[in-house]
Image: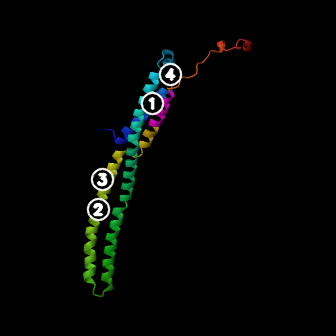
Amino acid sequence: MSSAADIVRDLAALVHALAALLETKTAREIPNIARDLGAQPQLVQGVDALGRVLGEIRAGAVPLRRTALDADALAALLGCVPTFVGGIGDAADASGDWLARLGIGLGDASGAARQVSGPIRQVSGVLDMGVDIAEGAVSLLAPAEWRGLITALDHLSESLKALKTPAPPTTPASATPGAALSGG
């Protein structure tokens, strides 16, 4: 089964392949063919329409990438909380032990400190499970893969725009003035 990261990565590869296809020598002839057929305005319209669609796709991908990165950062930040809460439980235990060792009639305070540490540790465990769930949810957002897709969309957009401009006509060497003189 494919993960979200696989899907985003595969989309980026597909978009890169489309851009590479548009950069082939054969595809670069499309503007020349359109010029020869008198269809340059239609080609430009088509390229512009596809460019707008790519722009809309990119505009949708950018906030998704930002959301994925923000969620990843939040999950990383939350990862510190269970350890911090567990440390508070340890501090409650230590303070209870310390109060008991003082031997100055603070047994009730010592017992209360020890009673608090158990629930604090339970909260720490629940928070730890929550962090695991958050990290799993973040992995579904595939934060590391979105940049590749956005870059691929930009590359495809540039390759597509290049189709609007016909390549200058090439003249064979034999048709170039003076070519016969340089032969020999």
Alpha carbon of mark 3 to alpha carbon of mark 1: how far?
35 Å
Alpha carbon of mark 3 to alpha carbon of mark 4: how far?
52 Å
**Label 2 element class:** helix
Of the two numbered discs 2 and 1 on the same chain, state the one appearing first in sequence: 1
Residue placed under numbered mark 1 in the picture: 17
Query: Disc 3 vs disc 1: Cβ atoms closer than 8 Å?
Result: no
Task: Tell me the residue at 39%/52% (across/down).
Answer: 70
Q: Amino acid at mark 3?
A: Ile
Question: Which portion, as a residue range, is magenta?
Answer: 153-162
Residue 118 circle label: none
Q: Nearer the viewer, mark 3 or mark 1?
A: 1
Q: Amino acid at mark 2?
A: Gly
Residue placed under numbered mark 3 in the picture: 133
Residue placed under numbered mark 4 in the picture: 31
Q: Amino acid at mark 4?
A: Pro
Q: Is residue 179 left or right of residue 117?
A: right
Alpha carbon of mark 2 to alpha carbon of mark 1: how far?
47 Å
Residue 100's spot in the image, x, y percent?
30, 82
Residue 125 circle label: 2
In depth, the one of 39 and 171 nearer the eye is 39
Query: Disc 2 vs disc 4: Cβ atoms closer than 8 Å?
Result: no
Q: Furthest-bottom residue in view?
A: 104
Residue 84's spot in the image, x, y percent?
36, 66
**Label 3 element class:** helix
Image quadrant where residue 119 sits? bottom left
Q: Furthest-front residue in view?
A: 41
